[in-house]
Image: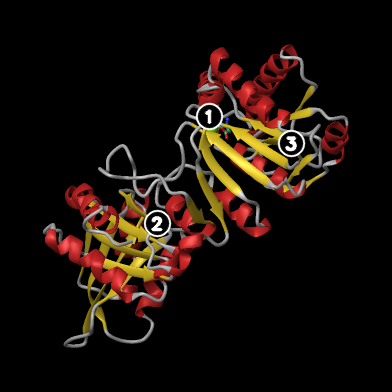
Amino acid sequence: MALIVQKFGGSSVANMERVRNVARIITETYKKGNSVVVVLSAQGDTTDDLIAKAEELNPHASKREMDMLLSTGEQISIALCAMTIEGMGYQVVSLTGWQAGMNTDSAYGNARIKRINTERIQTELDKNKIVLVAGFQGINKYGDITTLGRGGSDTSAVALAAALHADLCQIYTDVDGVYTADPRTVQGARKLEEITFDEMLELASLGAQVLHNRSVEMAKRYNVNLEVLSSFTGNPGTKVKEVVKTMEKTHVSGVAKDKNVARLALIGLADEPGTAFKIFSLLAKKKINVDIILQSIGREETKDISFTVARGDAEEAKRILEENRDYIGFKSIEMNTQVAKVSIVGAGMVNNFGVASRMFEALSNAGVNINMISTSEIKVSVLVDERDADRAVQAVHDKFFSEFGGNN
Ligand code: ASP
Ligand code: MG
């Protein structure tokens, strides 16, 4: 007997057929003798449709009213699913965020969960009921409805699992787990049996959008056992946890591509103390995030610094630096938006230099030129030309994961 939190995403409840399917998965879990708390997202594109409606009536609607509107999507899902489960002859109750004790701060549209008062849920579980909770929503100290930001139902589920000390939190979605690379574009990409929280966070921030980032951070903080799986196939999914079995090996979990990047280069900077500080403090003041930074060795009293930013920030970053040309002191500035970042992620690479060199070997064999390199404990990233990015990902993936090339 275990306490299991299950979360079903929008595509898993998109139509009546799928709601029935979800009701079947829930009741099967319950029949095995488990206590079950379920978090549901809004059906299909409901949230997008509601946003479109709001924009038509008032593109500047207050965030409070937006949350009032958007929270209705999840409410439809829990009520429909509860009725279905009732019809199957089980005891069930649906609860809105506030009924479930989900207390948040007041940042409408992007609220943070502060505390969950689990009393009501506990009472219902004690009566042997299946409990359905509306995802993505909570209540603030003024008694107003808040939402947790797009994709926030994952976070609702993990927070509930943490607060209830659940044995497992299953995130059901339309893919059957976390893959070694994007299975839609990379040949031979395969599903991972398990992955660590840190790896998942890296992959998520690199564009593998299987789980809401904040949900993974929270799962790590409270050590919630997560599992990502498909509501359509019934296959085993991917477990996300603190330590995984394969960690002692030289181990790369995935290859990710990020096209949302641009490179800026400042040429002919004075080779003296304070230069980097001037550049990056100007950007920080404008809240522009810098990722990879590379500085050349000084020669003839000058040096170059290049760095990457999100593509959407590139123009602004360039303008800020140009406006401060005299203060910083440089000869010229170059901007390249036709670049992409390719990364390998793996918890076991920390003490293993061979990993980076195998990646470079794969790129070299594929004739892909590397513009920049950065490494961290669990990641090696390279910046390449955008037109080489897909080829680069495939080559690196083949190296680490193909039956012949890889010994991962
Ligand atoms: N329905 C919300 C959204 O579409 C929350 C979620 O699905 O997690 O963003
Ligand atoms: Mg969603």
Horizontal side of 104 relative to 281 (left or right) equals right
332 over 185 or under it: above or below: below
Kindly identify which residue carries mark 3.
Answer: 34
* Residue density around tag 1, few if under 14, some if 14–19, many if 20 or more, within 10 Å: many
Residue at the image point whose x is 54% and y is 57% from the top: 197
**Gap between marks 3 and 1, in whole Å?**
18 Å
Q: CA distance from mark 2 to mark 3?
A: 32 Å
Of 294 and 187, which appears nearest the observer? 187
From the image, tell me which residue sits under label 1: 231
- Secondary structure, mark 2, is loop
Residue 83: quarter of image: top right
- Where does label 2 land, which residue? 253
| Mark 3 residue CB less than 8 A from any atom of ligand 1 | no
Q: Which mark is residue 266?
A: none
Q: What amino acid type is highlighted by mark number 2?
A: Ser
Give the camera-side residue of 290 and 241.
241
